[in-house]
Image (tube, rainbow, N blue to C red):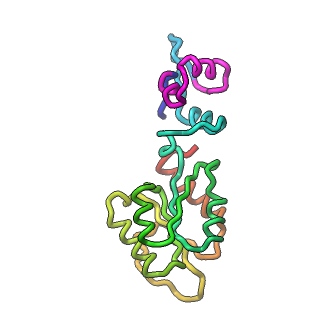
Amino acid sequence: MKVFTTGQVAKICKVAPRTVSKWFDSGRLKGYRIPGSQDRRIPREYLIKFLKEHGMPLGDLEDEAMAKCLIVAQDQVLIENLKRELPPEKAFKVAVAASGFEAGIQAESFSPDCIIVDFSIGKIESVQICQNLRKNVDFTDVILIALLPDDGQPMSFDRSAINETFKKPFDAHLLAERLRTLIGAKKELV
């Protein structure tokens, strides 16, 4: 568990250390004192909760506190449903790509924890996206979710690159909960 000093919190919040001490002493910012001294320590999750409650930017803490999901899809209804179930308040940060090319660019700059690929953009392109991501060492730990169309046609392809599949139509809330579980196993979501 990562903990911060009042000085470190002051730098993150861009305030004076005395201000952080006042937040701590008033009980607004939770933490503990080191036994035998007056030094204060603020656990990471309490700091993130405090920053969110007060509408302050998370700064460098954002990457470790939020689950970053890249949605590769063209279906606007699907994208909006997923965005609604993966809001920032529930520790999700979402980016969208409409093609394999865009997905590659977004994956490099956004560094997602999870990539959701809607196979409705085309089976060949979707499989290619999944295979290319798995070939890249930077993305071997990224969770890959495939959204398969339920058009009555059997989908045969190598699923070894994919962590999970959901057949459309699916429950977006269920997918969001599954993502929290999968990503939560790798990083501490707040």
Is residue 34 depicted above or below 73 in this figure? above
Residue at (53% x, 73% y) in the render: 118
Q: Is residue 165 visible?
A: no
Is residue 44 depicted above or below 106 in this figure? above
Examine the residues drawn in magenta and state their main secondary structure. helix
Q: As drawn, which residue projects farthest toward the bottom?
A: 153
- Percent coordinates x, y for residue 4 in the rendering: 49, 27
- In the image, 88 versus 137, the foreground residue is 88
Q: Is residue 15 visible?
A: yes
- Percent coordinates x, y for residue 56 in the rendering: 60, 36
Queried whether the magenta region covers residue 159, the answer comes back as: no
Q: Quadrant of residue 84?
A: bottom right
Residue at (57% x, 37% y) in the render: 48
Residue at (53% x, 19% y) in the render: 17
- Percent coordinates x, y for residue 69 in the rendering: 52, 58
Query: Magenta region: which residues?
Result: 7-31
- In the image, 41 versus 101, the foreground residue is 101
- Percent coordinates x, y for residue 120 in the rendering: 54, 79
- In the image, 24 versus 96, the foreground residue is 96
Queried whether the magenta region covers residue 14, the answer comes back as: yes
Residue at (47% x, 50% y) in the render: 186
Quadrant for the C terminus in the image:
top right
Numbered circles on residues, count = 0
Is residue 167 depicted above or below 104 in this figure? below
- In the image, 13 versus 24, the foreground residue is 13
